[in-house]
Amino acid sequence: VAQKGEKKADRDAVRKACPRAEKQIRTLRFHHLASKGPVYARSFARKLLGNEEFCMEIDAAMDFVEGWDVKVVGQWQMTGNEYGVLSALPFSLKDRERVESGQEVARQCAIRIGSEGVPLYDLHADGKAIGLTQPLLAYTHSSSFAFAKCHYE
């Protein structure tokens, strides 16, 4: 966990939310005054890795479905690719029922190339995939959710 906060309560919130996994959580803390944004913080996450097989990158305000850990490993295995990366823009909570039923998956289709030649992605999904039976190959990556073997970084 790369986390910013001012008070001790801010620093301990993740551990309190996951008491059964407390020994599995390593945290790198940034004082809110020294914070330089999520990309900067994510660049330090690699330093926290031990011998983990899988790595996941998510935004702080994520919610999880029951059994998410088994489901995401199963979906990754369906890629049939040691270097496969599951990545998607998450749906909002109001769309949770459709997502949990497996009916729809958010999809980011449009990419713009910025003035410096860097790909620019919208912050919201501009499409959806319906009725998938296996992961869909895509050319986009979302830092809101990414899951892969730790060696992909």
Image (spheres, rainbow, N blue to C red):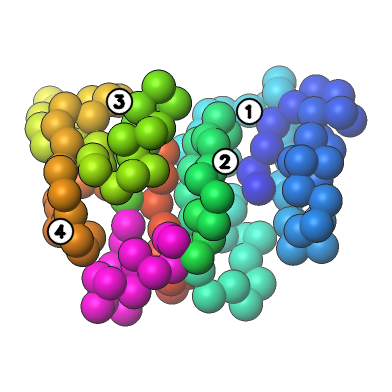
The residue under label 1 is: 35
Does 61 sit left or right of 3 as displayed? left
Q: Secondary structure at mark 3?
A: loop
Looking at the image, which residue is at 80% across and 23% down? 6
Looking at the picture, which amino acid does disc 1 mark? Ser
Tag 1–tag 2 contact (CB < 8 Å): yes
Looking at the picture, which amino acid does disc 4 mark? Leu
Mark with earlier residue (3, 2): 2
Q: Position of residue 134 (x, y in %)?
A: 21, 63
Looking at the picture, which amino acid does disc 2 mark? Ala
Looking at the picture, which amino acid does disc 3 mark? Leu
Does 84 sit left or right of 2 as displayed? left
Query: Gap between marks 3 and 2, in whole Å?
Result: 19 Å
Looking at the image, which residue is at 40% across and 65% down? 148
Does 69 sit left or right of 87 as displayed? right
Mark with earlier residue (2, 4): 2
Query: Gap between marks 2 and 4, in whole Å?
Result: 28 Å
Query: Gap between marks 1 and 3, in whole Å?
Result: 21 Å
Q: Position of residue 15 (x, y in %)?
A: 80, 45
113 or 96, nearer to the observer? 96
Q: Position of residue 147 (x, y in %)?
A: 41, 58
The residue under label 4 is: 137
